[in-house]
Amino acid sequence: MKFPSPLNGRNRIKRVFPIRNPILWVVLLTSLLLSGCVKYDVGLNFDNSNSGELVQHIKLGERLTSFSGDSVYEWLNSIERRARELEGKAQRVSQEEIIVRIPFSNGRELQEKFNEFFNSHTNQPSKSVQSESDSELPKIESNVLLEQNNFLLLVRNRLIYDLDLRSLSLIASKGNVLANAGSILDLEFSLKTPWGAKNIRLTETAIEPEKNGNRLVWKLQPGELNHIEAVFWLPSPLGIGGLLIILFVSGGLYLRYNFMPDPRIQFPPKAAAIQEQ
């Protein structure tokens, strides 16, 4: 009678976890080591209703850059190019870290530049990299809306930001789940205003921001539809300038007729006629 030979350690692993694709295991183990390797911060800084800037700070971990190769650096280069196209500046802190600043002068310009910079068409690598895996790139929809109401000296602003990150719920390759994107991506959106802002929470599951002085910071959730709303007030330079002009003219007229002699008395008509002769 023949008895089945006992399974050794290696055979047991194969029986419990059948390895059909060794490359998949390599990618899986690598992805597990890449926890928090991408820090992506987007911020809106307002000085007044006619001045502000869009700030983007990206920092990649060394493990990610060594694993992804040239495609990651090409993506950072594309961000620099798009910033220059929108009259912005890009500061390359290091090969893996970049800070982008794009100015805007009003709400409409903010919407146009923000949505153009982050839309799904321009937010892809260059053609040389894109041609390799167009179908595998996740589609991310981003849209910002700024409603402004002018009250002469002040402007009431209502910011609405929708970011669809449901395509990043899982990092996968050919249908095989590799890792949870939340363990790899650290995404933040911040809003800084002179007098602070008030978060509008429409649902119980809405993101609750952290308050740091006059700045609100939201932790974005990969794999979900992120919706952010906030209300804040900004000074209006146009209204304040108009008020100062009115006050200056009114003060001049007051001084002219109350503290200065009447020119009709100082220069009577006869004296003026003699001077003309």
Image: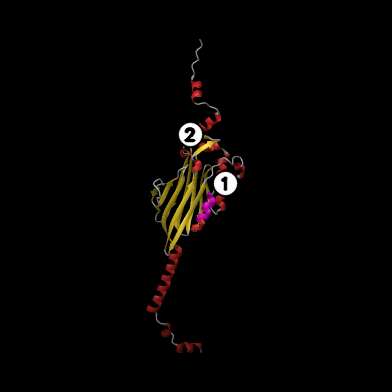
Q: Nearer the viewer, residue 202 or 13?
A: 202
Q: Main secondary structure of the magenta part?
A: helix
Q: Residue furthest left?
A: 258
- Location of mark 2 (residue): 32
Q: Is residue 136 above or below residue 47?
A: above
Amino acid found under the numbered disc labelled 2? Leu
Q: Residues within 10 Å of mark 2 (few under 14, many from 20)?
A: few
The magenta-colored residue range is 110-118
Point out which mark residue 211 bears.
Answer: none
Q: In this rendering, which labeled residue sits more in front, label 1 or label 2?
A: 2
Q: Is residue 25 above or below residue 210?
A: above
Give the x, y percent position of residue 53. 48, 54
Task: Specify the amino acid type for callout 1.
Answer: Ser
Considering the numbered disc 1 on the image, is that residue within a helix, a strand or a loop?
A: helix
Q: Badge 1 is on which residue?
A: 78
Q: Is residue 112 magenta?
A: yes
Q: Nearer the viewer, residue 12 or 100?
A: 12
x and y percentages locating residue 90 in the rendered image: 53, 49
